Amino acid sequence: MSTTSSATLAAARPAPATSRATPARSTWPWVLLLVLLAAGLTWVLKGYQLFQGTMVLCYAIALLGLNILTGYNGQISLGHGAFFALGAYAAAIAMEHGGLPYWAAVPVAGLACLFIGYLFGRPALKLEGLYLALATFALGVAMPQLLKYKHLEQWTGGVGGIVLMKPDAPFGLPLTQDQWLFLFSLLVTVVMFVIGHNLLSSGSGRAMRAIRDHALAAEAMGVDNPHYKSMTFGISAAFTGVGGALSAIAVQFVSPDSFTLFLSISLLVGVVVGGLGTLWGALFGALFIMFVPSLAESVSKAAPWAAYGVVLIAIMFVMPGGVVGLLRSASARWKRRPTP
């Protein structure tokens, strides 16, 4: 057997079960506790607070998708707000014109974004780095105008958008619409994070990281770079589309002007603030996107974006590896502390 073939088999061979079993056993109880605490917020938060919590979950799913692309595969996207918009519109059109229930419209939106993301990612393989970023930037700029296109107005509603109805709790559960939507979004978030964890722990996830670290070496070891990069782009778009679909149901309205280029920039900022190449970074990034702009406005109503910029610069100086990077550094220092 040749040296290349041996290296390929070694890369594809899964690691021994014992190498991953201990972290899994120690992590999942904490994950379960976090999910239960989040579910308990259903009866603590009220009204607009529940809406904010739901939007945090929507952004977390979208940021996980962008992190899979940028943090784990090394492809930079400045236009993922376009896929957030596509997911929102796909769900709205499926509910309004297709008569689908909200719970069926969410996976439909994810599949639609998976298909469109793969189609976009395939020719974009010829672009790397800043050139790919500019291509996705163009997509983010063009998307609001495409949604206003007159020949699509019968589906998208044009400038007026589409108004949706918030779903009621099923089976006669004693929950308000906001409470049920928060729990439904939490369930979808857990499912998407489990899917993301399993994907990144698999051979495909290792291939993604190999391409990020050194594309030429990965290809020399037998990794099909074009296939994995295209599929990563499609999967990333699917995650972002699911987040967009949930946000459309929560907001009860979609319009082209709701998905400006600033949304794409905010998603990328959220990924960096949370921590590139981390699962939990998506949650911290979503909290940043949801609450820091409003906090900056409360600090300075005259120049809120100046305050936002100062906060962002301070975070980058204090936490260059994002929130998760800071937590990992603090944990490592704690373990190295001298015992009395």
Image (tube, rainbow, N blue to C red):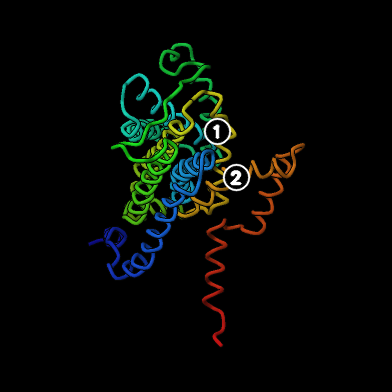
Q: Secondary structure at mark 2?
A: helix
Residue at image point 67% right, 57% down: 317
Q: Which residue is mark 2?
A: 291
Q: Is residue 252 visible?
A: yes
Residue 172: % across, % down:
31, 37
**Residue situated in front as seen by the camera: 82 or 53:** 53
Mark 1 or mark 2: whose residue is earlier in sequence: 1
Q: Secondary structure at mark 1?
A: helix
Q: Amino acid at mark 1?
A: Phe
How packed is label 1: few (under 14 Cα within 10 Å), some, or many (20 or more)?
A: many
User: Quadrant location of the N terminus?
Assistant: bottom left
**Residue situated in front as seen by the camera: 247 or 218:** 247
Where 126 sits versus 8, above or below? above
**Residue situated in front as seen by the camera: 253 or 333:** 253
Residue 35: % across, % down:
40, 54
Residue 197: % across, % down:
37, 53
Mark number, residue 137: 1
Circle 1/circle 2 CB separation < 8 Å: no
How packed is label 2: few (under 14 Cα within 10 Å), some, or many (20 or more)?
A: few
Where 106 sits versus 153, above or below? below
Q: Quadrant of residue 16?
A: bottom left
